[in-house]
Image (cartoon, rainbow, N blue to C red):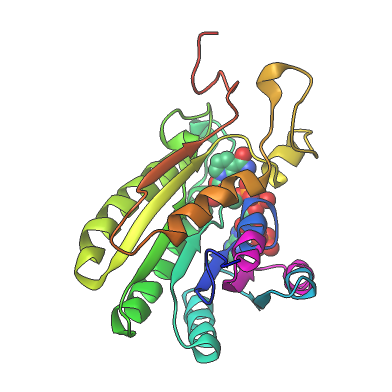
Amino acid sequence: MTRQLQNKVAIVTGASNGIGRAIAETFAAEGAKTVLVARRADLLAEVEAGIKAKGGEALAVPADLTKEDEIGALFDRATKIYGRLDALVNNAGIATNLNTEDITLQYWNEALAINITAAFLCSRAAIRIMKAQTPQGGRIINIGSVSAKTPRPDSLPYTVTKFGLQGMTHQLTMDGRKHGIVASIIHPGATLSSFTTRRGRAKSGPGATADDYVMAGEDVAKVAVLMAALPGEVNLYEATILPNNMKSFIGRG
Ligand SMILES: NC(=O)c1ccc[n+]([C@@H]2O[C@H](COP(=O)([O-])OP(=O)(O)OC[C@H]3O[C@@H](n4cnc5c(N)ncnc54)[C@H](OP(=O)(O)O)[C@@H]3O)[C@@H](O)[C@H]2O)c1
């Protein structure tokens, strides 16, 4: 059976855990040569080994995406090894949870550095490669959040960066057209990850009440595969995926 991403080359940021890990594993299972990026080298090595044990192709490249030089080295290494780049998934991110009046400039800058500046720097690096390669083009998939539509209380930096990713996706879509580069965004609701583990949920699926359902990273990964596998002329521009009972997003019973 033909796999949906056979021989495509993809870089997935935040592949050491949660949604990014699920996207990386699913991309590799669909035949992509998958570059795994995050800071924790031990976890990345585990993901790489798991993919290879199933016959997939993966390369772990530990990097701190708040550092411009580490991003440069990552893209250099990926293209040196695989020769091209078909998809970038900007997934790495952190949550914030503080009253606005208590947010220091350092806290603000740290959230922006990973949630939005890293996505810009990675997109810039990807565009340079995608524009120059033959055949030209590729895809950039940003992981937003339902917070880009319905913010959570006391989450100013998170909300601002997720709204920012929406704008970045819009801009990249327009500007990418001339080079065959397609940008899209996925807005997940509650999904198993360090975000949910911190709130006491270590397993996906139903919780104590119907509103408490937590999606698996693989649910989000299926949407990312769908986006990445479409013909280059077609864009699934935006997708919101959430537990159907998530009343905080689609409310009133
Ligand atoms: N889970 C949800 O319910 C949910 C809902 C909506 C949107 N999202 C979005 O989904 C994305 C993934 O988050 P997650 O939920 O899967 O959380 P997670 O389990 O905490 O994963 C976050 C990933 O980002 C990486 N990361 C963080 N800072 C980094 C840095 N400076 N450099 C490189 N990598 C870094 C982490 O790896 P290292 O720590 O190893 O560096 C980790 O792999 C985020 O953008 C988040 O906003 C999540």
Q: Position of residue 35 (x, y in %)?
A: 59, 74
Specify whether 157 is left or right of 132: right
Magenta region, residue range: 25-49
Taking the spot 54% from the left edge, 72% from the top edge, the residue there is: 6
User: Is residue 3 or residue 108 the one in the foreground?
Assistant: 3
Residue 65: which quarter of the image?
A: bottom right
Q: Position of residue 159 (x, y in %)?
A: 45, 38
Q: Is residue 41 above or below residue 229?
A: below
Does the rendering let one see residue 94?
Answer: no
Residue furthest top as drawn: 253
Taking the spot 77% from the left edge, 66% from the top edge, the residue there is: 43
Residue furthest front as drawn: 1
Locate the N terminus by quadrant: bottom right
Q: Position of residue 253 (x, y in %)?
A: 55, 8
Number of numbered discs visible in the structure rendering:
0
Q: Is residue 219 above or below residue 250?
A: below
Q: Position of residue 2 (x, y in %)?
A: 56, 67
Residue furthest bottom as drawn: 80
Q: Is residue 243 above or below residue 237?
A: above
Residue 135: which quarter of the image?
A: bottom left
Taking the spot 53% from the left edge, 70% from the top edge, the residue there is: 11
**Is residue 35 one of those drawn in magenta?**
yes
Taking the spot 63% from the left edge, 51% from the top edge, the residue there is: 19
Specify whether 158 is left or right of 126: right
